[in-house]
Amino acid sequence: MEVAWSSTFRKMKSELMHHQELGLTGPQFHMLSLIARQKTCNVSYLADKLEVKPSAITVMIDRLVQSGYVERRHDEKDRRAVLLSVTTRGAEVCEEARKKSREVLKSHLSLLERHELDVLLGIIEKLGKAGKSK
């Protein structure tokens, strides 16, 4: 079961997260999505969400800035803090990537019967609740 679980979700994650045609790697898409949800956030917030040190994401932020997807500026209240926000272009690319991800997920889920989808949803919700309680 572990092998089937791992291989299935690894394949799906790869298809859902990687958007080379949009110039985004999986981790870049994840980071762009996190920034977009917050509207504006700092590097520490991202590092916390990604469970890495702030220095570990600097290069990825640089690439998103160079691509024109993210804007970096200093916080007016604390000049040491760097704030990140998604540009108009970044928001468009993020939405396009999300649409593609939804299409991929829909394609995978279309292989299941209605009752199988209901069971899967119940399992996912149960696992999600178990993960939150830890």
Image: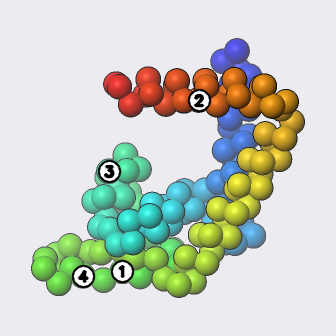
N-terminal of the two: label 2 or label 4?
Answer: 4
How far apart marks 1 and 2 lie (CA) works out to 36 Å
**Picture disc at residue 50:** none
Percent coordinates x, y for residue 10 in the rendering: 68, 37
Amino acid identity at mark 2: Ile
- Where disc 1 sits, the SS reads strand
N-terminal of the two: label 4 or label 3?
Answer: 3
N-terminal of the two: label 1 or label 2?
Answer: 1
Task: Tell me if residue 42 comes above or below residue 122 in the rendering.
Answer: below
Residue at mark 1: 72
Q: Is residue 97 left or right of residue 34?
A: right
- Where disc 4 sits, the SS reads strand
Residue at the (59%, 29%) spot, across then down: 124
Residue at the (66%, 44%) spot, across then down: 13
Quadrant of the rendered image containing residue 27: bottom right
Amino acid identity at mark 1: Arg
**Picture disc at residue 124:** 2
Q: Residue 93 versus residue 113: which sits nearer the camera? A: 113
Amino acid identity at mark 3: Asp
CB contact under 8 Å: marks 1 and 4: no
Amino acid identity at mark 4: His
- Where disc 3 sits, the SS reads helix
Residue at mark 4: 74
Could one spot residue 1 in this view of the protein?
yes
Percent coordinates x, y for residue 18 in the rendering: 68, 57
CB contact under 8 Å: marks 1 and 3: no
Q: Nearer the viewer, mark 1 or mark 2?
A: 2
N-terminal of the two: label 1 or label 3?
Answer: 3
Q: Is residue 91 left or right of residue 115?
A: left
Q: Nearer the viewer, mark 2 or mark 3?
A: 2
Residue at the (70%, 56%) spot, across then down: 101
